[in-house]
Amino acid sequence: MKTQSVRTISSLAKMVAFLMLAVGLVTNTAMAQSKPGPTVSPGGHYAGVESSPGTLEPSTGIRYGNTLVLNNFAKSETRHLTISLDYATAQFVPNNFIVTGGSWSLVVFRDGAYFGTLYGNVASGNVLVQEGNNSEPGDLTQVTQVNLQGLGGLGEFEGKKAIYLGGSCDVTTDLRKGQAEGIANFNF
């Protein structure tokens, strides 16, 4: 009889240990899923305009406030991206400029309703001005490649840690027409 009691207690102890382990695993999994982590947004095609060429400061050689306003219209989501950047001449490389700063914001609408806004600084990048592919005189394009550092968000993005926010953008602008288009990717 003692042997049977010991076996029953031993079996019960194993069952309790197993249940505790199972509950612990479920709790840890649920906690890990609720933590705000990075979500990679699929890259999208953006089109828009260069709303301002910016202002050149002759004494420093820095152009301030070159602004691009771009839109992405997907089936259930609309995104409006604004990038304002400052850049300076890259020494010894004609028509190549180094991004020195700036800011950006991304306003997102889902199913026709406001979802949220992300915003941050332009962390780095470069701007290359080159003759366009057309043979027309004065045909210039500007290729802008920037890395976007997130600082915060509003709406559904509020409370996301800045380390998870950011992105990159590669845009070509026809400087005669002011039209811009390219690809942007975001993490949020």
Image (spheres, grey):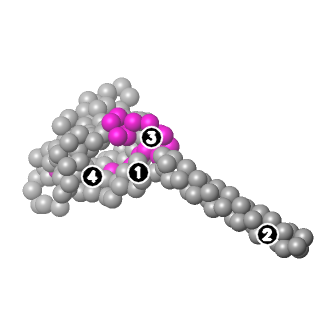
Q: Please, what is the three-letter code of the amino acid marked with disc 3?
A: Lys
Mark-to-mark CA distance, 2 and 1: 54 Å
**Percent position (x, y) of residue 69?**
21, 41
Residue at image location 84% in from the left, 73% down from the top:
4
Q: Is residue 22 visible?
A: yes
Choose between 183 and 107: the one closer to the eye.
107
- The stretch in magenta equals 153-175
Q: Please, what is the three-letter code of the amino acid marked with disc 2?
A: Thr
Of the numbered discs 3 and 1, the one sitting upstream in the chain is 3
Q: Is residue 185 magenta?
A: no
User: Mark 3 against mark 4, which lies toward the viewer?
Assistant: 3
**Residue at mark 4:** 171
User: Mark 4 against mark 2, which lies toward the viewer?
Assistant: 2
User: Mark 1 against mark 4, which lies toward the viewer?
Assistant: 1
In the rendered image, the vertical position of residue 146 relative to residue 65, given as above or below: below
Mark-to-mark CA distance, 3 and 1: 11 Å
**Residue at mark 3:** 160
Numbered disc 3: secondary structure = loop
Mark-to-mark CA distance, 1 and 4: 18 Å
**Residue at mark 1:** 187
Q: Please, what is the three-letter code of the amino acid marked with disc 4?
A: Val
**Residue at mark 2:** 8
Numbered disc 4: secondary structure = strand
Give the label on residue 79, or none: none
Choose between 162 and 28: the one closer to the eye.
28
Of the numbered discs 2 and 3, the one sitting upstream in the chain is 2
Residue at image location 18% in from the left, 52% down from the top:
73
Residue at image location 31% in from the left, 31% down from the top:
64
